[in-house]
Amino acid sequence: MSTRVYLDWNATTPPLAEAIDAMAEAARDAWGNPASVHAFGRAARVRVEEARAAVAQLARCDVRGVVLTSSGTEANNLALRSAFANDARRGAVLVTSRLEHPSVARVAEALEREGRARVHWLRVRPEGVIDLDDVARACDAGDVCLVAVQAVNSETGVVQPVREVIALARRAGASVHVDAVQAFGRTAEVADEADTRSLAAHKIRGPKSIGALVARPGVALAPVLLGGSQERGLRPGTVDPVAAAGLALAARHALTSPARWAAIAPLRDALEAGLLRLAPRGRVNGAGAPRAPHVTSVAFPGWEASELVAALDLEGVAASGGSACSAGTSDVSSVLAAMGDHEAASCSVRFSLGEETTMSDVETALAAAEKVLSRG
């Protein structure tokens, strides 16, 4: 097929050519073990520390607060489990919602099964925003250890009221973890008042297999895995200097990315309007809430999301039925179900654009959608 259009940037971003070059250079010159004290190890260690410094600059935090991980998922696990690692807090309350990524929601479920936490599942408004009144009620009820909230929803692009959540949690003496994986490099808001934040390199045009947990000074973290003393004993396992080189380059690029992503909004709007013209019964999930500029989730009643995604792929357009971390399952979207739209939960397609998306791409996608939808 001569033309393929990639509209699944929320699943993963195309790596920057410069990041690929930086990784290739590191693979040649810095392949040593960063924990080794000889010259080969020191060369590798330089790449690791450059990545840590670049993440700290992006997150506007102290470099000592950056723990390198294998992914945003590991970072979320580390943040939530650390908050409840102290037996003195056993049975305290974790406040979160069903809008969260599985690496938050499923950890919350596990902590409750283990008796380490009681989970308060927040109410979700129909437009896909957590109910701040419910956050306040949960915090005022007492014994809240942690509030976990995402910055940007991966499926709908809805932006959550993170600063308001932090203020309510602070009033109650609770800590806050922000899953900022879909926010870093795409929005100007990086939730730097949160106690912990998660980042994934492949969402900011870097490589997979590396991410970070960013913690404020004084926040106590406890390892999820046991082993060596890497990352101050918080994340045992050899850090890959090659992936670190890609992360460093991507994080520096992400410093100036929000303006580029904001410019995508007209393309997203044109795609959205065109899809709704083709599907008169269609609707945009989260349309009534503040959204990131590059994402649209459209419900197509009468269709199965998996069928639409497959048909679009055959026409050369890559989109998704929701979070890539839930792909391959028969489950409907837990995000859209939490918003109360059970029909949309099984018939919605997410289109996520990126820095390299063009109007030509949008037009190609609409032409493909017209072919597919005409068969319904």
Image (spheres, rainbow, N blue to C red):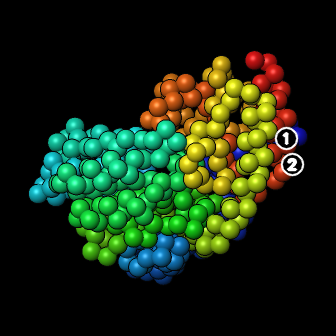
- Tag on residue 364? 1
Q: Does residue 175 show up?
A: no
Direction from residue 264 to residue 114 in the image, left or right: left
**Dot 1 alpha-carbon crowd within 10 angstroms: few under 14, some 14 to 19, many 20 or more:** some
Q: State the image quarter where residue 277 is shown.
A: top right
Q: What residue type is labelled 2?
A: Ser
In percent of width and height, residue 75 lies at 40, 57
Residue, far left? 88
**Residue at 40% over, 61% down:** 164
Q: State the image quarter where residue 102 is shown.
A: top left
Q: State the image quarter where residue 201 is shown.
A: bottom right
**Residue at 85% over, 35% down:** 367
Judging by the rendered image, the residue that carries numbered circle 2 is: 360
Label 2 SS: helix
**Residue at 85% over, 41% down:** 364
Q: In the image, is residue 148 above or below residue 259? A: above
In percent of width and height, residue 92 lies at 18, 51
Q: Locate the N terminus and report the quarter of the image it occupies.
A: top right
**C-alpha distance separating marks 2 and 1:** 6 Å
Direction from residue 52 to residue 246 in the image, left or right: right
Q: Which amino acid does label 1 sit on?
A: Thr
Label 1 SS: helix
Q: Does residue 147 show up?
A: yes
Badges 2 and 1: C-beta atoms under 8 Å apart? yes
In percent of width and height, residue 153 lies at 52, 48
Direction from residue 299 to residue 175 in the image, left or right: left
**Residue at 71% over, 45% down:** 7
**Dot 2 alpha-carbon crowd within 10 angstroms: few under 14, some 14 to 19, many 20 or more:** few
Q: Locate the C terminus and report the quarter of the image it occupies.
A: top right
Q: How many labels does the image show?
A: 2
Residue nearest the observer in this picture, 70 or 132: 132
In percent of width and height, residue 219 lies at 28, 69
